[in-house]
């Protein structure tokens, strides 16, 4: 399956909100409510920040929120903080026990 | 605490095979899927495949079919991934990550990650 499509970069000032999109097809994002989002700092392993489109793992602040419409999922980071500067990846279930990732978005806090 | 600890860095020549291990602790090993994800230098995450540690069933990404083998040892709570016919494009950091409960399909997010294993393929 092809990778999900994310914008390569996004940015916002402290306190603002920024939204990152993740576009797939009816065979992955549009077909299942199993979209996850991961935050990754340079040289570190990814960290799950959203699962099942809009749920928070324990310990993740509710400044992170997720949604989905059709074949596109979105991650919104509200009240941007300097520590939110990282790479963000979406992933989706794609059937037959397969997952697919997006290409990643580098979030810059101005 | 729940953790996945991976084996150390590897350097291999083109055409060789590499095996990376992932030892689980802090939870019931056979209850959760283990996925493997890799990241080439400066690139994004690429899903490789998943193993059900309970029965050993596997599913691999199409791009790795025929070159990738995942196995598990329930006596040591360890999962292994072996990639053969290595080429320079396989140079990457390889991660294992815990998925959801094995009683349902492997639909869930990856909530615990190993520290990563760097595999370098060079002549």
Image: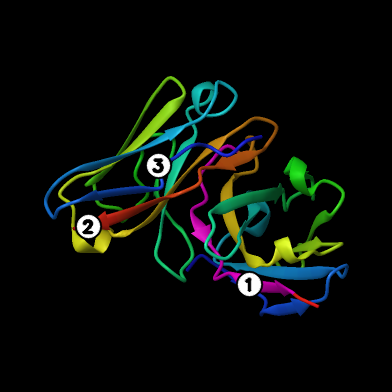
Locate residue A95, reporting x and y percent: 65, 30
Place of residue A92 in the rendered image (x, y in percent of width and height, measured from the top left): 53, 36
Tell me the residue at 57%/35% (across/down): A93
The residue depicted at 50 percent of the width and 28 percent of the height is: A29
Q: Secondary structure at mark 2?
A: strand
| Same chain? Circles 2 and 3 | yes
Could you classify mark 2 by the number of other residues whose Cα lies within 10 Å: few (under 14), some (14-19), or many (20 or more)? some
> As rendered, which of B57 and B122 lies closer to the eye?
B122
Q: How is the image coloured?
A: rainbow
The verdict on residue B115 being magenta is yes
Q: Which residue is mark 1?
A: B117
Question: What subunit carries mark 3?
Answer: A
Label 3 sits on residue = A7
The answer to which image quadrant residue A84 occupies is bottom left
Does the magenta segment cover residue A89? no
- The residue pinned by badge 2 equals A109
- In space, the residues marked 2 and 3 are separated at their CA atoms by 16 Å
What's drawn in magenta, residue-wise?
A: B107-121
- For disc 2, the chain is A
Q: Is residue B1 left or right of residue A11?
A: right
**Which image quadrant: the N terminus of chain A?**
top right
Seen from the viewer's position, the closer of residues A11 and A24 is A11
- Picture quadrant of residue A98: top right
* Corner quadrant of residue B93: bottom right
Residue B97 lies, with reference to residue B58, above or below; the image says: below
Dot 3 crowding, Cα within 10 Å, few <14, some 14–19, many 20+: some
């Amino acid at each position: 399956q092809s990778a999900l499509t994310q914008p390569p970069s996004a940015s916002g000032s402290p306190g603002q909100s920024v939204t990152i999109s993740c576009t797939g097809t009816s065979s992955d994002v549009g077909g299942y409510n199993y979209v996850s989002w991961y935050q990754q700092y340079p040289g570190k392993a990814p960290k799950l920040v959203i699962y099942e489109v809009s749920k928070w793992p324990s310990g993740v602040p509710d400044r992170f929120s997720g949604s989905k419409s059709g074949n596109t999922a979105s991650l919104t980071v509200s009240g941007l903080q300097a520590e939110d500067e990282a790479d963000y990846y979406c992933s989706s279930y794609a059937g037959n026990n397969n997952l697919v990732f997006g290409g990643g978005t580098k979030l810059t806090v101005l | 605490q729940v953790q996945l600890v991976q084996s150390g860095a590897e350097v291999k020549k083109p055409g060789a095979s590499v095996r990376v291990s992932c030892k689980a602790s802090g939870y019931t090993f056979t209850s959760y899927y283990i996925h493997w994800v890799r990241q080439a230098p400066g690139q994004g995450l690429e899903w490789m495949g998943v193993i059900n540690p309970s029965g050993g069933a596997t599913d691999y990404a199409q791009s790795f079919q025929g070159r990738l083998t995942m196995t598990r040892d329930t006596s040591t709570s360890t999962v292994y991934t072996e990639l053969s016919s290595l080429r320079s494009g396989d140079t990457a950091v390889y991660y294992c990550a815990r998925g959801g409960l094995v009683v349902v399909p492997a639909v869930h997010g990856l909530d615990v990650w190993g520290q990563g294993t760097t595999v370098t393929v060079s002549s």
